[in-house]
Image (cartoon, rainbow, N blue to C red):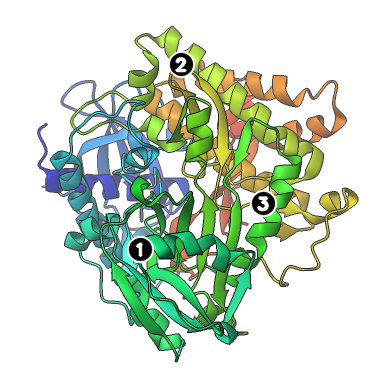
């Protein structure tokens, strides 16, 4: 089936919607053989007892096997398992539009959701699809296949499909007073215009040597000087209306075009090499991208320097840290106002990588395919031409990753948000081997306070109420399980076609080797937690329907780690008795 770019964009959002609806238990799902032959379809329909007889059918890719009980799907459905066509409402209605499909399914949901919320979600899904179409156009206009000779920032732009499973994978909703973001605006957001503004020092909370660190860049860009009672702060021109709405004394000193490129997150920038500025800039942006408003809270700006010190002290040498050296944010006691003017200066690590003969490649890029090529970058870069080569490479990759990420979790209660966007692979340009990793973006990590306090870490300087600190070790472990195993490892396995080729078995075996549950009592506790029969699955749609983001809604599902294990049957049985949300 040949799809237009518009069709592809619609289906990218719709397949995430359908998978999430099944995974969250918002409907029932069965697997049926299509009457046209051996093609198998995933059939979504109302939960048992409903009088609604409608359903939505979508084709499963060849070779996909879903665990079922009485033909009801009980395993995780990944969006990449699905392919067109979609048939809605028992009719020959072929429609890939996620807004239309949501309308078909709305009466099935077990929640009492207002019609207005459903319409809002529909518009947001349409926004994702519209933006995805533009991302496909951008990719088509720059079809180059990258190599390790390409700079790190080029790898940031390979993630043209956004989040691998969130239905809001390409959402970009501006919050007033910002202008609405239209698909045609995305190109300019990738090479944004910067504004350098002067703000009274009393209106800001400065952490670390912000002024001194920024000074060389200001001189190179010929930014006018300001008085000693004011601070020069870079921001996105796009963000200026939001800043002016909350800060009464702001002078724009200069706007600068074509000096920076956006990374995956869009709000973090890599400065052009000719500026010789060895730091990334992470800037507030009052746009909802996937599930969150991408402003930067004082908790993050004020905590970044301390978190950097903790990570540098306790992480292994081969897990580099994108050090957050300085930051600035608003001084208001109302953090919801203060967060709209924030800037973090973060080490770029480029010079360190070059000195080591390495290229920094955002890990999620390895699971991506270049435009119009059905081969992942992992296969291209590392010459993975056979199943055995993929399995061996994957084994080495996760062994290196687990050996760096998991010991700090066991020993110190440091839970890194280790999904593929926050972990950067360090690849040797001479040998094409992954030598180690680097970690960035600390707003989503979890630190177990009692454990770190035993190692003389003092958290008293941090503002109270931040999300990264917890006294509950299970919250730390759960965050790592979601980001590292469900997201990072799951995405790579699916992309390489290893999920049903002992990929989860390799993962479980490697996890046991690294945690050594027979010889390390603390490793045993973590191993037992990671290998429970069921695992919590984050319910993105329910969180949106109930207006929650930080307060997670989760559902217990069979633990994918046990897919290739003799314990899979017990995982299914445990799932059957757990059918509830937490």
The number of discs equals 3
Residue indicated by mark 1: 221
Q: Dot 2, crowdedness within 10 Å: few (<14), some or many (≥20)? A: some
Q: Position of residue 370 (x, y in %)?
A: 25, 31
- Nearer the N terminus, badge 3 or badge 1? 1
Q: Position of residue 302 (x, y in %)?
A: 64, 67
Q: Position of residue 83 (x, y in %)?
A: 25, 35
Q: Nearer the viewer, residue 212 or 175?
A: 212
Residue indicated by mark 2: 501
Q: Label 1, label 2: how many angstroms apart (C-alpha)?
A: 53 Å
Residue indicated by mark 3: 308
Q: Quadrant of the N terminus?
A: top left
- Nearer the N terminus, badge 2 or badge 3? 3
Evaluate whether residue 70 shows in this view.
no
| Quarter where residue 145 is shown | top left
Disc 2 is placed on an element classified as helix
Q: Nearer the viewer, residue 7 or 366?
A: 366
């Amino acid at each position: 089936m040949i799809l237009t770019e518009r069709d592809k964009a619609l289906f990218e959002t719709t397949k995430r919607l359908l998978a999430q609806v099944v995974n969250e238990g918002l409907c029932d799902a069965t697997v049926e053989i299509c009457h046209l032959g051996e093609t198998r379809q995933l059939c979504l329909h109302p939960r048992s007892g409903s009088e609604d007889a409608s359903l939505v059918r979508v084709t499963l890719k060849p070779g996909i096997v879903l665990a079922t009980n009485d033909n009801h799907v009980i395993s995780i459905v990944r969006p990449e398992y699905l392919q067109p066509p979609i048939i809605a409402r028992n009719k020959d209605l072929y429609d890939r539009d996620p807004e239309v499909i949501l309308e078909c399914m709305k009466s099935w949901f077990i929640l009492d959701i207002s019609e207005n919320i459903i319409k809002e979600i529909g518009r947001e899904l349409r926004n994702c699809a519209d933006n995805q179409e533009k991302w496909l156009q951008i990719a088509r206009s720059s079809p180059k296949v990258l190599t390790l000779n390409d700079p790190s920032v080029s790898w940031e732009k390979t993630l043209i499909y956004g989040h691998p499973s969130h239905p809001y994978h390409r959402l970009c909703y501006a919050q007033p007073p910002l202008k609405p973001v239209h698909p045609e605006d995305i190109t300019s957001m990738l090479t944004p215009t910067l504004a350098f503004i002067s703000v009274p020092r009393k209106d800001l909370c400065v952490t670390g040597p912000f002024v001194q660190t920024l000074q060389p860049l200001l001189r190179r860009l010929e930014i006018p000087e300001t008085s000693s009672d004011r601070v020069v702060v870079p921001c996105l021109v796009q963000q200026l209306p939001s800043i002016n709405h909350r800060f009464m004394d702001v002078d724009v000193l200069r706007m600068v075009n074509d000096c920076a490129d956006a990374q995956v997150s869009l709000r973090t920038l890599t400065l052009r090499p000719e500026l010789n500025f060895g730091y990334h800039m992470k800037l507030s942006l009052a746009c909802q991208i996937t599930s969150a408003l991408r402003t930067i809270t004082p908790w993050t700006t004020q905590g970044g320097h301390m978190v950097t010190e903790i990570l540098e002290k306790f992480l292994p040498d081969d897990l580099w840290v994108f050090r957050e050296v300085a930051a600035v944010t608003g001084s208001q006691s109302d953090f919801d106002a203060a967060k709209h003017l924030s800037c973090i200066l973060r080490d770029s690590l480029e010079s360190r990588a070059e000195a080591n003969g390495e290229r920094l490649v955002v890990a999620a890029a390895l699971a991506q395919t270049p435009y119009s090529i059905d081969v992942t970058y992992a296969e291209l870069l590392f010459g993975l031409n056979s199943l055995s080569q993929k399995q061996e490479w994957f084994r080495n990759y996760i062994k290196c990753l687990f050996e760096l990420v998991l010991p700090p979790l066991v020993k110190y209660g440091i839970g890194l948000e280790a999904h593929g966007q926050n972990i950067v692979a360090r690849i040797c340009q001479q040998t094409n081997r992954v030598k180690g990793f680097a970690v960035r973006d600390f707003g989503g990590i979890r630190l177990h306070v009692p454990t770190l306090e035993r190692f003389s870490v003092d958290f008293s300087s941090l503002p109270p109420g931040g999300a990264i600190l917890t006294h509950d070790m299970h919250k730390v472990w759960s965050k790592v399980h979601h980001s590292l195993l469900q997201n990072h490892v799951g995405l790579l396995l699916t992309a390489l076609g290893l999920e049903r080729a002992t990929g989860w078995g390799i993962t479980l075996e490697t996890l046991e080797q690294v945690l050594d549950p027979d010889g390390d009592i603390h490793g045993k506790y973590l191993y037992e937690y990671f290998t429970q029969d069921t695992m919590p699955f984050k319910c993105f749609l329910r969180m949106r329907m109930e207006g929650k983001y930080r307060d997670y809604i989760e559902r217990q599902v069979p633990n994918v780690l046990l897919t290739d294990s003799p314990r899979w049957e017990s995982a299914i049985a445990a799932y059957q008795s757990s059918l509830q949300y937490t």
